[in-house]
Image (tube, rainbow, N blue to C red):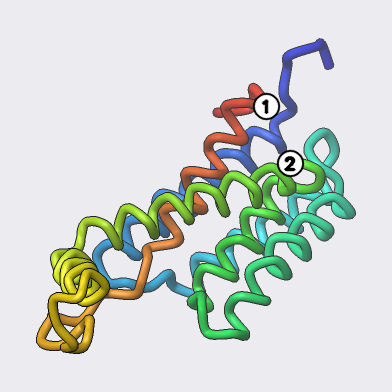
Amino acid sequence: MRTGEMDTSRIIGLCVLVVVLAWSVYTELTVQRIPNWLTMTGVGAGLLLGYLPGGITFRASLIGFGMGFGFLLIFYLYGGMGGGDVKLMGAVGALLGYPLIVPAIAYTAFLGLLLAVFRLLSQRAFWLRAGRLARRCAGGGTAQAGGGAPPIQRTVPYGLAIAAGTLLVLVMAGTAP
């Protein structure tokens, strides 16, 4: 294989990855969930492609799965993440393999943080509460900071951050399909 040339199994893996990510973003934004059949298909495809010559190895795929799944599993266990997001990151790990899953996790975490902050700052309820708290701190009243304000939405479509972080890794690594 010449430098800069990719093997067929690697191209198939990257195409499967892009389809899984696109479908995940679509379903998360429309129905607020990522289906198991989609994430498990990604995991299975990644592990299966690890047996074929040319692409990532089975070992790299398995380690990538474990790292992606394991990293977000911690947040899921403490109630800060949905199960679909955890399985999606596992599928990304299986399809990207190790070592590319490492920067994918880092970029995903950073982009997820930005997404959460943007979501919070874009909510009217946040600004109502912040204003009441500022008035209270300035001595303008003793009312509760959040009294009467609508509830703040606490969910973030983390699948979007996973997709963006993963695609950023592919572009920076020069392996985008």
- Figure quadrant of residue 8: top right
Residue at image point 73% right, 41% down: 100
* Contact (Cβ within 8 Å) of mark 1 with mark 2: yes
Label 2 neighbour load within 10 Å: few <14, some 14-19, many 20+: some
Identify the residue under disc 1: 173
Instruction: Work out which quarter of the rendered image holds the N terminus and state it.
Output: top right
Mark 1 and mark 2 lie on one chain; the one further toward the N terminus is 2
Amino acid type of disc 2? Leu
Q: Which mark is residue 100?
A: 2
**Vertical arrangement, residue 12 with respect to residue 79, above or below:** above
Residue at image point 85% right, 38% down: 53
Amino acid type of disc 1? Ala
Q: Left or right of 159: which side holds 139?
A: left
Looking at the picture, how far across and down is residue 122, in whole percent? 21, 56
Q: Left or right of 173: which side holds 23?
A: left
Residue at image point 50% right, 73% down: 84
Instruction: Work out which quarter of the rendered image holds the C terminus and state it.
Output: top right
